[in-house]
Image (cartoon, grey):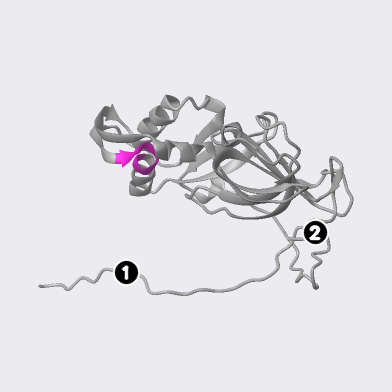
Amino acid sequence: MDTSSIITGTTLNRYQLDIPSCTASLDVEEFSGAEKLSELYYYTITFTSAEKNIDAAQLLSKPAMLTMGGGALQQLADCKRVHGVVTAFRRISSSEDQSTYQITLQPFLSLLDKQFRSHRFFVNKSVPEVVEQVLQEHHLHDWEYEFNLKQHYPRREQINQYQESDLAFIQRLLAEVGIFYFFTLQEEAQSEVVHFADAQRALMFDKTLPVNSPSGMSDSGAESIWGLNITQQCRRGERHYPGL
C-alpha cells in the first residue's frame, strides 16, 4: 500500500499504529488484513522503529489500534480505525538505524481460543445466554457485545462443552442456530464491539464506495474498490424420493 500521505508524528505516513503499552515510536511500513462475517478479523502489520530490541512482553495480548487515513496530507479526519489485541509478534530484521517488526492484530475475542475446556455443561439456558455467560467469564463489559436477535431461542435442558476452546464452543453454538457475528468500533471507548444477529436488519446499509483502479503506485488517496470478481461453486442439497 502507498504510505506517503498523512503526517504521523515526525514521519510522513498515512497509517498509524498505536500500542499504549509500548513507549517506542512505531512507523507502519505495510499491512494486510481480512474482515468477514462470523470470523475473527486479523491484520498483519509490519513496522519499523529506532528501538532495536522491543520486548515481546510489551506487546503480546496488549491493546492496539491501527488507523488508516483517507487522503493526502490530511490530519486523520477521514479514516478507518481497527482496534484489537496483539496476538503475535516477531522481529524481522535490524540495521544500524532501525529494526523491522511484525505483529498480528485481532479482536479480544481471539483470546477465548486460548482457554481450553475438557468438559463442562450449562443447565436450563438458551444459546444466547450461554454465549453471554462465556463472554462475561472473560471479563467483557456489557457494552463490548450486543445481541440483536429477531428469533426466539428457547432454553435447553443441557448444553455441553467438550474438548474445545471457549471460542470454538460459542462459534459452534452460534452456527447451529443460525446466529452470525461481526465487529464494529465503539468510538467513545475506542474499543471493538462484537454484534450477534440473526437477520439482515443488523447489517450496515447505504454504504457506497467508488470503483477506482489504482494507477501505478498511486491509489489517489481515496477509499475505493480496486476490483471485483465472481466465484461460483457446487453446494450440497437434499432429494426426496416419494414411495421409497
**Picture coordinates of residue 132, whole percent (x, y):** 42, 30
The residue closer to the viewer here, 2 or 81, is: 2
**Picture coordinates of residue 229, whole percent (x, y):** 59, 73
Q: Quadrant of residue 236?
A: bottom left
Give the label, 2 or 1, closer to the camera.
2
| Res 183 visible | yes
Element under label 1? loop
Q: Residue at x 39, y 30 (%)?
A: 134
Question: Could you tell me which quadrant the N terminus lies in?
Answer: bottom right
Q: Residues within 10 Å of mark 2 (few under 14, many from 20)?
A: some
Q: Is 131 left, or right, of 117 in this rendering?
A: right
Q: Earlier in the sequence, mark 2 or mark 1?
A: 2
Residue topped by disc 1: 236
Inspect the magenta stretch and tell me whether residue 199 lies in it: no
Question: CA gap, disc 2 to disc 1?
Answer: 41 Å
Element under label 2? loop
- Against 42, residue 220 (above or below) is below
The residue closer to the viewer here, 216 or 22, is: 22
Inspect the magenta stretch and tell me whether residue 166 lies in it: yes
Q: Give the number of the disc on residue 142.
A: none
Q: Is 147 left, or right, of 207 in this rendering?
A: left
The residue closer to the viewer here, 57 or 233, is: 57
Q: Residue at x 40, y 37 (%)?
A: 114
Q: Which residues are magenta?
A: 164-169
Main secondary structure of the magenta stretch: helix
Q: Give the number of the disc on residue 222.
A: 2
Q: Is 241 left, or right, of 221 in this rendering?
A: left
The single residue placed furthest to the front in the displayed view is 96
Amino acid of disc 2 = Ala
- Against 77, residue 233 (above or below) is below
